């Protein structure tokens, strides 16, 4: 059909549709107002019939299907096998709306998106109320008596799935009559469907048992295997996709995928309808084994997660819906995170493009629209990101629950009596953070028990309760998680610290004098420091607090210490809620791209090269009257400095209030949201690098860890002096 | 997707035929070639199938299930491990239901049953490589028995 | 092509020598792609690549074997293997074919200039001997 003819036909078709829809509307209104009359019903029937014919000719399947069902119902009414009720009038109005939308989408030409399965289903069920077995289209399967309405358990499963946002499809498959190995074909279909979502019901019942039987090598009777198969599947894809997936399997004669309607049905079993959703208490469903890293289950709250593709989803019974949680495969979460990450990246670029366009064509309306849409996108994606991050969060109890046993064992072997208090078990953290914070916490706990808390005898002499109190607490604070490890032991003697530091040459006399007590306490975080007179077996494994701090800094966190001699010690750790997506400053060193986490960036300046001076062998620069040590990142990573003659050097000032550094780079490329990916355990931990990310163009950019760079500098400076 | 579209709607595929029976291989070759596909190689056992797969990199492999020196299921598994995008169509005699299932679990995309119905076979070939074929009531004729 | 129902290996070339890896250990074989260097990493780790969104470390066997590095050619490939639950990519000069061995002998003290502990055996094929790589050893440390 050449295009001009086609468009002429389309034009005529659309005109006719408009006419018939108009007629339909008049007649349905009349039906509602004046009740059924032969003429009204006949007019409606004819309109539906006409539309059915023309949409068939045009190849407009959806309209054809809908009008076909309408025609059928109207035919039953016309032959007095069905009565007219308000329900029917409602249905007809709905059909009209659907037809209008179909027509509009057809005109727009960019695809048909109306889901008519639901209304078709309703029409069929209405028609089913007639006495005769209505004439069914050839693809209908036997057992159309909707199975799940009678079975409360299946009903509950369907409702539960729909509540969690899944689409439930009623899938009928007819195999070709001479299909060989029907059982295997049926199994393949079931198998393929299970990869799309969760199987709620199969018909003939027992398809699953037969599959299990096969595993045991039982042979079953090919002869008695049915050609009509039926499934109820809960998934998150479109009906079209399900249909297409099944059509790729050989020997499938027909496939019909109907969305299972979401509505409150009268006559539904009371137990199912009455079950209210009980809100999920936090931490109700423990995750398993994620701490050990290789397991594949993690529970998520609020049902925002993806379904478990294997048939093992936990769908609770209707009567007892306690915790609304589902088990989610960790890999799917990762994938979800990646996708969100990519969305974030793309949205940032759209935003950038929008800004540029806005500058170039300030008066253009379309550009305005783009900017508006981009802003809206940003908001939506921001929310999406937050939601997905929440999905990845787990209660820290997963980690804390290991401690009681550990503390008990430690206390016994060290002959101490410990009273362990754990607070804030339900505080949620991102999985990755939980995995990483375990080691440092264990170190702190071991230290507290080994060095902090005194033996019972000594405590009694000091007038303290014999049992030492060790308190581990977690809580949310703004956008962070605060973890406290506190003991009521001997506390840390500041003077002892000062002397030790002095003795080890970690600090000079004059510098020492300048330190306040809190600052002096922080000396324990210096590398090479340990006040233990002997490194005991238990906590001897690299007990250095510098390692603990390094670990925490790698998580973009901070640790602080407060201690009073005789009273106790408290370590406070603050961590960001998630590591997965951060705002990064993209920089270029020579021809390579790196990312500096924005959270570490204090400010960005440009200075002429002469501004960098050398004082006692150290390069420094003066920024707003403060002397800041300078680090050429090229040197840290042994990248040759390109001989770019620049008038201004871009400098990133990083660090915390008391420890700042000025990092020199070749170019500041921009800032954007990036998805943090680990380098993997084979590469291991690289000083100064916390991970990698994949940029929009597919390039891999390494993410800097400012703490490590600081340590590099300190080591270098130490060596020099 | 690989293959060249020589006439509208038809995509020519490079196929490798694996079966321990020379006669069967000949039959499948005839069917494929007269449909316009190119048979780039044959193998008579699973080991040869794996070796030749790496060498020839066909668009599609038809794989018999029972063969000496590594059966079709094993060969399917190995080929899919080397190339996760490999498309494999199993050919099976009647009565081997459990093995066909194993084959699908090992990564085979679909299966046809011997004796091979020419039209059904060609439809399966097209489906495996991604063409959407609307189901029809085609009554093919049996081409070869075994 | 003598196949006696034994294990299959993929034969690769590095320098002038032929080596083999068990097919079961191989996840995928891809063309050479740009590698992002990781400063201060283990010397034989050349860097990482982006494999369909996953970060995969790349290892140079030449470096491991003490051979000089050569520029990549069109036949250079990355053999991605499974190692301790992770994927690692090994750069090879060329991937030859899939092969089975009619006989496998234990490795000698040294294979060429390389220490024998990196190999799990020497396999016999129709056209010569091939040294079978012991991935654990090569990728550890």
Image (spheres, coloured by chain):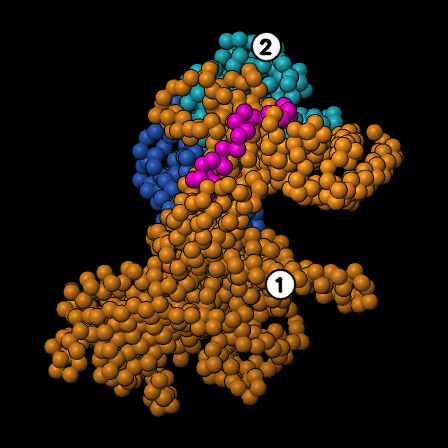
Chain colours: A orange, B cyan, C blue
Q: Where is residue B89 shown, x and y percent of the image?
A: 53, 24
The spot of residue C124 in percent (x, y) is: 39, 27
In the rendered image, which quarter contains the N terminus of chain A?
top right
Q: Which residues are magenta?
A: A133-158
Mark seen at residue B143: 2
Image position of A605 (left or right of A578): right
Image quarter of residue A468 = bottom left
- Residue A611 x %, y %: 59, 82
Around disc 2, counting alpha carbons within 10 Å, would you say few (fewer than 14), some (14 to 19), or many (20 or more)?
A: some
Left-right relation of A457 to A35: left
* Quadrant location of the C terminus of chain A in the rendered image: bottom left
Tag 2 subunit: B
Q: Is residue A11 above or below residue A550?
A: above
Q: Considering depth in this image, is A645 or A65 the residue closer to the camera?
A: A65
**Residue A500 vertical placement versus A122 (above, below):** below
* Residue at x 27% of width, y 86% of height: A495
């Amino acid at each position: 059909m050449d295009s001009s003819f086609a468009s002429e036909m389309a034009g005529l078709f659309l005109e006719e549709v408009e006419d018939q829809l108009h007629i339909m509307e008049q007649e349905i209104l009349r039906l509602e107002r004046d009740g059924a009359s032969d003429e009204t019903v006949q007019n409606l029937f004819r309109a539906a019939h006409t539309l059915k014919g023309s949409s068939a000719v045009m190849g407009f399947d959806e309209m054809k299907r809908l009008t076909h069902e309408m025609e059928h119902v109207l035919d039953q009414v016309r032959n007095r096998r069905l009565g007219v009720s308000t329900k029917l009038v409602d249905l007809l109005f709905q059909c009209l709306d659907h037809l209008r939308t179909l027509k509009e989408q057809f005109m727009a030409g960019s695809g048909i998106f109306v889901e008519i399965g639901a209304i078709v289903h309703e029409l069929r069920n209405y028609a089913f109320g007639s006495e005769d077995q209505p004439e069914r289209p050839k693809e209908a399967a036997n057992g159309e008596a909707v199975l799940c309405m009678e079975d409360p358990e299946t009903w509950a499963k369907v409702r539960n799935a729909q509540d969690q946002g899944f689409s439930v499809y009623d899938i009928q498959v007819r195999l070709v009559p001479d299909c060989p190995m029907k059982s295997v074909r049926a199994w393949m279909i079931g198998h393929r469907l299970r990869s799309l979502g969760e199987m709620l019901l199969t018909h003939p019942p027992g398809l699953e048992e037969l599959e299990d039987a096969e595993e045991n090598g039982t042979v079953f009777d090919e002869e008695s295997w049915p050609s009509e198969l039926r499934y109820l599947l809960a998934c998150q894809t479109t009906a079209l996709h399900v249909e297409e997936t099944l059509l790729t399997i050989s020997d499938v004669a027909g496939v019909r995928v109907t969305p299972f309607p979401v509505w409150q049905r009268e006559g539904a079993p009371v137990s199912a309808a009455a079950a209210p959703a009980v809100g999920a208490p936090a931490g109700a469903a423990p995750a398993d084994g994620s701490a050990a890293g290789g397991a594949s289950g993690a529970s998520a709250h609020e049902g925002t997660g993806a379904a478990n593709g294997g048939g093992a989803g936990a769908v609770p019974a209707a009567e007892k819906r306690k915790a609304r949680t589902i088990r989610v495969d960790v890999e799917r979460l990762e994938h979800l995170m990646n996708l969100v990450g990519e969305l974030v990246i793309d949205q940032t670029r759209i935003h950038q493009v929008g800004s540029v366009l806005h500058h170039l064509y300030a008066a253009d309306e379309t550009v305005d629209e783009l900017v508006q849409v981009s802003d809206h996108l940003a908001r939506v994606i921001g929310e999406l990101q937050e939601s997905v991050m929440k999905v990845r969060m787990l209660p820290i109890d997963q980690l804390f629950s290991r401690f009681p046993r550990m503390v008990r064992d430690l206390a016994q072997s060290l002959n101490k009596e410990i009273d362990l208090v754990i607070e804030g078990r339900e505080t949620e953290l991102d999985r990755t953070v939980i995995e990483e914070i375990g080691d440092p916490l264990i170190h702190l706990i071991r230290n507290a028990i080994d060095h902090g808390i005194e033996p019972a005898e000594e405590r009694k002499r000091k007038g303290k309760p014999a049992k030492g109190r060790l308190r581990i607490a977690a809580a949310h604070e703004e956008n962070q998680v605060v973890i406290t490890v506190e003991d009521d032991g001997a506390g840390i003697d500041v003077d002892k610290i000062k002397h030790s530091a002095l003795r080890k040459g970690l600090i000079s006399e004059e510098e020492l004098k300048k330190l306040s007590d809190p600052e002096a306490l922080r000396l324990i975080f210096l590398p090479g420091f340990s006040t233990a007179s002997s490194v005991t077996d238990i906590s001897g494994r690299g007990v250095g607090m510098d390692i603990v701090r390094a670990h925490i800094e790698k998580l973009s966190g901070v640790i602080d210490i407060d201690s009073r001699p005789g009273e106790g010690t408290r370590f406070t750790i603050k961590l960001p809620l998630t590591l997965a997506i951060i705002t990064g400053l993209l920089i270029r060193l020579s021809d390579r791209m790196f990312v500096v986490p924005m959270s570490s960036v204090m400010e960005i300046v440009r200075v002429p090269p002469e501004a960098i001076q050398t004082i006692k062998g150290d390069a420094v620069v003066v920024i707003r009257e403060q002397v800041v040590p300078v680090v050429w990142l090229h040197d840290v990573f042994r990248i040759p400095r390109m001989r770019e003659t620049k008038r201004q050097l871009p400098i990133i000032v990083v660090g915390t209030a008391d420890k700042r550094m000025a990092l020199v780079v070749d170019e500041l490329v921009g800032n954007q949201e990036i998805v943090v990916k680990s380098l993997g355990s084979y590469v291991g931990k690289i000083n100064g690098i916390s991970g990698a990310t994949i940029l929009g163009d597919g390039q891999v950019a390494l993410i800097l860890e400012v703490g490590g760079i600081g340590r590099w500098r300190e080591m270098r400076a130490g060596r020099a002096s | 997707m690989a293959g060249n579209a020589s006439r509208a709607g038809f995509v020519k595929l490079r196929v490798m035929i694996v079966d321990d029976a020379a006669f069967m291989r000949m039959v499948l070759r005839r069917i494929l070639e007269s449909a316009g596909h190119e048979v780039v190689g044959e193998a008579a056992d699973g080991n040869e199938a794996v070796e030749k797969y790496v060498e020839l990199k066909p668009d599609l492999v038809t794989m018999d299930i029972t063969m000496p020196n590594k059966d079709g299921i094993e060969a399917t598994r190995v080929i899919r491990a080397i190339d996760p995008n490999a498309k494999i169509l199993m050919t099976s005699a009647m009565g081997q239901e459990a093995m066909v299932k194993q084959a699908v679990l090992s990564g085979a995309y679909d299966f046809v049953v011997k004796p091979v119905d020419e039209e059904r076979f060609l439809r399966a070939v097209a489906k495996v490589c991604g063409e959407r074929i609307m189901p029809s009531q085609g009554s093919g004729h049996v081409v070869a028995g075994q | 092509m003598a196949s006696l129902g034994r294990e299959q290996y993929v034969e690769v070339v590095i320098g002038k020598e032929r080596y083999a890896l068990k097919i079961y250990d191989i996840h995928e074989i891809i063309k050479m792609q740009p590698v992002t260097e990781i400063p201060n990493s283990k010397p034989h780790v050349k860097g990482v690549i982006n494999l369909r969104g996953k970060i995969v470390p790349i290892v140079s066997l030449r470096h491991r074997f003490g051979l000089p590095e050569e520029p990549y050619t069109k036949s250079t490939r990355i053999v991605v293997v499974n190692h301790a639950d992770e994927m690692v990519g090994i750069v090879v000069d060329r991937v030859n074919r899939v092969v089975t061995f009619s006989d496998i002998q234990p490795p000698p003290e040294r294979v060429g200039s390389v220490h024998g502990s990196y190999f799990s055996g020497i396999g016999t094929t129709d056209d010569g001997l091939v040294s079978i790589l012991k991935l654990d050893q090569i990728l550890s440390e």
